[in-house]
Image: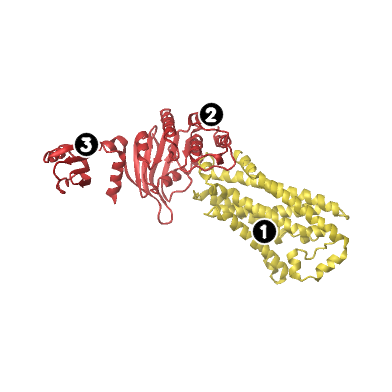
Chain colours: A red, B yellow
C-alpha cells in the first residue's frame, strides 16, 4: 500500500521558487530519501503535504486520503520534524512536549521519558536556553512521541553531533521495524545512503531521478583511476560511457558506465603503473546527475 | 481546549499589566476631579471659553465636568482608546504570532483544523477582552461612586462599558481579520494600530468640524460616546447595527482567509 501518493504536485510562488509537476509514491514500511540542494523544493513539497501551504496544481494523498481535505484526520498518524525548530518562548521542554502530546488522544508521558533518555535531553530546562542541537532533540521527541505511522523529517540531522546522529538513526530504524514509514529529506547524501531504501533526487523543483539506493549505486558506474608510465594521450579515454574525465599527465580518473570488458581492453592497450577501480559513492553519482542536466 | 488554555497563559502577563494600567488611569484621572470639583462651575466656564478644537481634543464637548459623571465621561474616551488598542493588538498577534515565531510548523501539523485553531484563539481573546472590560467597570464604578454625590451612576457606567465592549470586539476582530489577510505576519500589528489611530483621529476631527458630521459612521469611536450614552438616549440602534455588521464581516474574513492562507514559514 502507498502511504504517500503525490501526483503532478505543483506550487508556484511568485516567479522563482516552488515545485513543478512532482509525482512519486512512498510505500508502506519504507524509508524514503528525498535529496537535493538547498532551495530545490524539498521543504515546499513537505509543507504542501502537511497542508501548511496549498498546491497550485496536482494533489497528494496520505494513507489514501487527500492531504488537504482530510488534513486533521491524517495528521493524527504523522510525526513531523521541521528543518528549523522554533518553539513557544518561556516554555519548559516538558511543558512543550506535554502540549504537543495533548493534541493526540493518547497518553504519551511514558514515551516522552523513554525518548528523552535515549536522546539524553534534560526535560526541566527552558527551551530558550537550549543549544541548537538540544532544540533539535526536542523536535525529534516532539515528532515521535505519539508513535506515528508516518514520520516526515526535513533536514533532521543539522546541529546533531555524530554520536547523537547515530542514536537518532537507530531510533528511526527501530520505528521503521515497528512499521513506521519514513520520508527523509536531506542534502547530505551519506546519511541518506546509510538509512534509505529508495531515493528521489529533486532539482530546481523537479524530480530528476527516482531509484533504489542499491540500483543507484550499482547502476554499473565504476570509478576508474589509472596511473601510467608515459603521459596519456588526452583523447585516449574520450569514449562512449566515460564521464567526469580528469587527466593530469600520467594519471587519469573518470566514471564509467557500460560494458566493463571494453574498458578493460582499452586499458590493456596502454602501459599502466597502477589502477584503482572503485564503487563511486552516492555523492559522485549525484553530482553527475546534476551536471548532466546543466 | 489545550490551545485555549495555552493562549490564556501566554496572554496572562500582558493582561495583568493592562489591568494595572486601567486601575491607575481611573484612579489618577478621577483624583483630579477632586481638585476640579472644589472650584465648582468656574471650571465649566473656563472650558467653554477654550476654542472648540481644544475642547474636542480634550474630549469635553458638551459634558458638565463639574459633576463626577461628566468628568468620568472625559476619562472614558481615553479608557475606550486603551480598550481598543488592547483589543486590536491582541487580535492581530494572537493570530499572526504563530507565523511570526514560526510555531505554525508545530501547531498546524497537529490533528486540528484551521477553523478550530481560530475558534479557540478567538475564545481565548474574548475572555481577555471581557476581563479587561470587567476590570474597567469595577474600577470605574467604585472610584466614580467615591466622588459622586448625586444619584448612583452604576447603571450609566454599565451602559458605557457595554458600548466599550462592542468597540473592543470591533477592534479585536479587525485585528484577527488583518492578521489572516496579510502575508507578512510582522505587519499585522502595525496595520491594525494604524487603522485604529486613523479612526480615532477622524473622531476628533469630526468633533472640531461639525460640517463632516456624516463621517461619524466610519469611526467606531463615535458610536458609544459618553455624552450620548450617559446624557443622551443611551446606545444608538443605528450604531449597534453598524457594529454588528462590522463584527460579522471581520469574523467572516478571519475564518475565510485563514483557511486558505499559505503559511509564511
Both on one chain, marks 3 and 1?
A: no
Q: Name the residue under label 1.
A: B242
Mark nearest the camera among 2 and 1 is 2
Q: Nearer the viewer, residue B205 or B114?
A: B205
Residue A145 lies, in percent from the top left, at 51, 32
Residue B211 appears in which quarter of the rendering? bottom right
Q: Name the residue under label 3.
A: A277
Could you say whether the residue bearing mark 3 is in a helix, strand or loop? strand
- For disc 1, the chain is B
- For disc 3, the chain is A
Mark 1 neighbour class, 10 Å CA radius: few under 14, some 14 to 19, many 20 or more: some
Q: Distance between the residues labelled 2 and 3?
A: 49 Å
What residue is rendered at 68% in x and 55% in y? Answer: B84
In this picture, residue B23 sits left or right of residue A106 = right
Residue A166 lies, in percent from the top left, at 41, 32
Q: Distance between the residues labelled 3 and 1?
A: 82 Å
Mark nearest the camera among 2 and 3 is 3
Both on one chain, marks 2 and 1?
A: no
Q: Name the residue under label 2.
A: A113
Both on one chain, marks 2 and 3?
A: yes
Mark 2 or 3, nearer chain start: 2
Q: How far apart are marks 2 and 1 (CA)?
A: 55 Å
Amino acid at each position: 500500500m502507498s502511504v504517500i501518493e503525490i501526483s503532478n504536485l505543483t506550487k508556484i510562488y511568485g516567479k522563482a521558487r516552488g515545485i513543478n509537476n512532482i509525482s512519486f509514491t512512498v510505500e508502506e514500511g519504507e524509508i524514503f530519501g528525498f535529496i537535493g540542494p538547498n532551495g530545490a523544493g524539498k521543504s515546499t513539497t513537505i509543507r504542501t503535504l502537511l497542508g501548511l501551504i496549498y498546491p497550485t496544481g496536482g494533489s497528494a494523498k496520505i494513507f489514501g486520503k487527500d492531504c488537504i481535505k482530510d488534513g486533521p484526520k491524517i495528521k493524527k498518524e504523522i510525526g513531523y520534524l521541521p528543518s528549523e525548530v522554533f518553539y513557544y518562548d518561556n516554555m519548559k521542554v516538558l511543558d512543550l512536549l506535554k502540549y504537543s502530546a495533548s493534541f493526540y488522544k493518547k497518553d504519551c508521558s511514558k514515551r516522552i521519558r523513554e525518548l528523552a533518555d535515549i536522546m539524553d535531553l534534560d526535560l526541566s530546562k527552558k527551551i530558550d536556553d537550549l543549544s541548537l542541537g538540544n532544540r533539535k532533540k526536542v523536535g525529534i521527541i516532539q515528532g515521535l512521541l505519539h508513535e506515528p505511522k508516518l514520520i516526515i523529517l526535513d533536514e533532521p540531522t543539522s546541529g546533531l553531533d555524530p554520536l547523537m546522529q547515530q542514536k537518532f538513526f537507530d531510533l528511526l530504524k527501530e520505528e521503521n521495524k515497528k512499521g513506521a514509514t519514513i520520508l527523509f529529506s536531506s542534502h547530505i547524501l551519506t546519511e541518506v545512503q546509510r538509512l534509505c531504501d529508495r531515493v528521489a533526487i529533486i532539482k530546481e523543483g523537479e524530480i530528476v531521478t527516482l531509484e533504489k539506493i542499491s540500483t543507484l549505486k550499482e547502476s554499473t558506474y565504476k570509478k576508474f583511476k589509472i596511473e601510467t608510465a608515459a603521459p596519456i594521450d588526452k583523447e585516449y579515454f574520450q569514449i562512449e560511457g566515460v564521464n567526469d574525465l580528469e587527466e593530469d599527465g600520467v594519471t587519469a580518473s573518470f566514471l564509467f558506465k557500460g560494458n566493463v570488458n571494453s574498458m578493460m581492453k582499452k586499458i590493456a592497450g596502454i602501459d599502466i603503473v597502477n589502477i584503482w577501480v572503485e564503487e563511486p559513492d552516492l555523492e559522485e553519482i549525484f553530482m553527475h546527475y546534476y551536471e548532466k542536466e546543466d | 481546549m489545550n490551545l485555549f488554555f495555552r493562549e490564556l497563559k501566554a496572554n496572562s502577563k500582558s493582561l495583568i499589566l493592562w489591568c494595572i494600567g486601567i486601575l491607575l488611569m481611573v484612579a489618577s484621572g478621577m483624583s483630579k476631579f477632586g481638585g476640579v470639583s472644589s472650584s465648582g462651575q468656574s471650571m465649566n466656564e473656563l472650558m467653554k471659553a477654550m476654542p472648540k478644537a481644544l475642547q474636542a481634543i480634550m474630549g469635553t464637548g458638551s459634558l458638565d465636568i463639574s459633576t463626577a459623571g461628566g468628568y468620568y465621561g472625559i476619562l472614558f474616551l481615553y479608557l475606550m482608546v486603551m480598550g481598543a488598542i488592547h483589543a486590536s493588538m491582541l487580535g492581530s498577534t494572537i493570530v499572526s504570532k504563530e507565523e511570526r515565531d514560526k510555531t505554525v510548523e508545530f501547531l498546524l501539523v497537529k490533528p486540528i483544523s484551521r477553523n478550530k485553531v481560530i475558534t479557540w484563539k478567538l475564545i481565548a481573546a474574548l475572555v481577555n477582552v471581557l476581563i479587561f472590560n470587567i476590570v474597567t467597570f469595577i474600577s470605574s464604578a467604585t472610584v466614580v461612586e467615591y466622588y459622586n454625590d448625586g444619584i448612583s451612576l452604576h447603571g450609566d457606567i454599565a451602559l458605557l462599558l457595554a458600548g466599550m465592549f462592542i468597540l473592543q470586539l470591533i477592534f479585536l476582530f479587525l485585528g484577527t481579520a488583518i492578521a489572516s489577510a496579510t502575508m507578512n505576519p510582522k505587519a499585522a500589528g502595525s496595520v491594525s494600530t494604524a487603522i485604529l489611530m486613523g479612526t480615532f483621529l477622524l473622531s476628533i476631527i469630526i468633533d472640531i468640524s461639525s460640517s463632516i458630521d456624516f463621517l461619524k459612521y466610519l469611526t467606531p469611536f463615535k458610536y458609544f460616546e459618553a455624552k450620548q450614552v450617559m446624557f443622551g438616549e443611551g446606545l444608538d440602534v443605528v450604531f449597534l447595527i453598524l457594529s454588528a455588521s462590522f463584527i460579522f464581516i471581520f469574523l467572516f474574513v478571519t475564518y475565510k482567509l485563514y483557511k486558505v492562507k499559505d503559511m509564511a514559514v
